Amino acid sequence: MDKILIEGQTPLAGQVRVSGAKNAALPLMATAILSSGLLTLENVPNLRDLTTMANLLRHMGGRAELAPGRAGLDISALITPEAPYELVKTMRASALVLGPLLARWGRARVSLPGGCAIGARPIDLHLKALEAMGAIIDLDGGYVVARAPQGGLCGAHIHFDTVTVTGTENLMMAATLARGRTVITGAAREPEVTDTALALQAMGAKISGLDTDELTIDGVEALGPATHRVMPDRIEAGTLIVAAALAGGRVMISGAPHQALDPVYDKIREAGVTLTLEGDVLRVESDGPVKSTNITTRPHPGFPTDMQAQFMALMTVGHSVAMITETIFENRFMHVSELSRLGADITLEGRTAVVRGVRRLSGAPMMATDLRASASLILAALAARGQSEIARVYHLDRGYDRLDEKLMALGARIRRVRA
Ligand code: EPZ
């Protein structure tokens, strides 16, 4: 398994472009199941999770071509509507095929995702909502076995009392081919949900209420071919901003989705980092002390949970004490014990991490546990004195497009050792 070695305390300089968003590309690939034509995606990032999704679509009998920056997806042939455990266990977002399979083919057999490092992450809300549309759902041997009623799914009023991003995406996709109108209240407002809706509209879907917590979808007979450009990855952009803040120096980040990043920009500025927007380019300058800043993760437009670990890395060298509260997942503090190996002073009190800033971090060997934790360890290592080593970087490659190479191009002393 690959390792990443980092020699800390080298200021960053130069320009970097943000890649396409993982959490938009995944639902966008699933929308291809709904279409009777070719879906072409541009600005597709090079990520392991997308390869897994492509393999899943091929397993079903579809055509899924991934090339650097683009994907060609045609699932118009009759397919095997099944997502097997060996694929789903490596990527929970496979559950996103459930709604499209039911809507287009009337049946689905999808492995339950099982838990993951950051929490149980059930899909009960997805299943309950699909039942409200008339789906008959059984659980059999760890699989969801679902079928649509005679005549197909029916439009319904669906209310999510817990905001669920992929739950909203699953039901929005299912509703595009259902009979009649579906209204989803309590819908997730993440920008990636909107990006998926824009692609569905290009395919002929009738969806309104984008960017709000109430989506209205009027079912249509069929969806056709489309071309869609995947939105930039706001979490990769936020990760690069924190890298520049921790390493010091001046970095120009191009292609970031600024509006989608407002909640992150606010907190990064509060932490004393200078962010200057120059058209499409964001200039990040950090030469002063880091101000300890409290955050609480919330559904969009709140502070994103996917930036919590990275922001915690920044707070480890804050001037005082920062309170970091995680409200979305029950176990998303796996990076705390690893950051402590660098000398960080963090104590957990329930869902809040109390981060007391220290004057200096010192390099050490660490182990990645999940996707965003692995990014957080790299960021902290950039600020630490001496060498750090991060093992199990396969977590990183699931969701970041060559982050180590991007940081190296900005002058970081970072290299990957293929084990
Ligand atoms: C999406 O996961 C993202 N993944 C996650 O990004 C992100 O952290 C999360 O949304 C929250 O923003 C993709 O978009 C592929 P949820 P998702 O359903 O949809 C509970 C990353 O690092 N819940 O919004 O799976 C759930 O347990 C990943 O890129 C239920 O109880 O998350 C969690 O506590 C990590 N029952 C909360 O809701 C359900 O049926 C929010 O989960 C569904 C969710």
Image: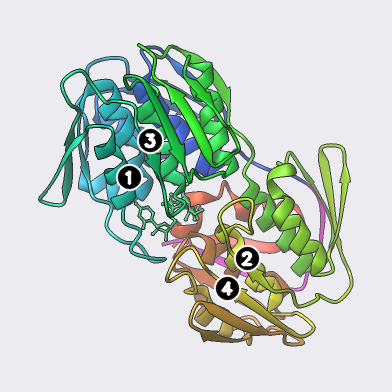
Q: Residue at x 45, y 59 (%)?
A: 395
> What kind of residue is marked 2?
Gln
Please report whichever mark, 1 or 2, sits nearer to the chain's N-terminal start: 1
Instruction: Give percent across and percent down for residue 380.
Output: 65, 72
Quadrant containing the N terminus in the rendered view:
bottom left
The stretch in magenta equals: 1-15
The single residue placed furthest to the left in the displayed view is 141
Q: Say which amino acid is labelled 3.
A: His
Question: Is disc 2 surrounded by few (<14), some (14 to 19) or many (20+) residues within 10 Å?
Answer: many
Label 4 – label 3 distance at C-alpha: 33 Å
Dot 4 surroundings within 10 Å: few (below 14), some, or many (20 or more)? many
Amino acid at pointer 1: His
User: Label 2 to label 4, Cα distance in Å?
Assistant: 13 Å
Which of the pair 285/268 is nearer the observer?
Answer: 268
- N-terminal-most mark, 4 or 3: 3
Q: State yes or no: discs 1 and 3 in contact (Cβ < 8 Å).
A: no
Magenta-drawn stretch contains 247:
no
On residue 325, the disc is: 4
Q: Is mark 4 within 8 Å of ligand 1?
A: no
Q: Is mark 3 within 8 Å of ligand 1?
A: no
Q: List the residue tagged with mark 3.
A: 157
SS at mark 4? strand
The amino acid type found where label 4 is placed reads: Thr
Task: State the image coordinates of residue 258 (x, y, percent, origin top left).
Answer: 75, 44
Instruction: Name the mark on residue 310.
Output: 2
Number of labelled discs? 4
Number of the label disc, if any, that sits on residue 126:
1
First along the sequence among labels 2 and 3: 3
What is the chief secondary structure element of the magenta stretch?
A: strand
Within 8 Å: ligand 1 and the Cβ of disc 1?
yes
> In front: mark 1 or mark 2?
1
User: Is residue 11 visible from the viewing direction of this image?
Assistant: no
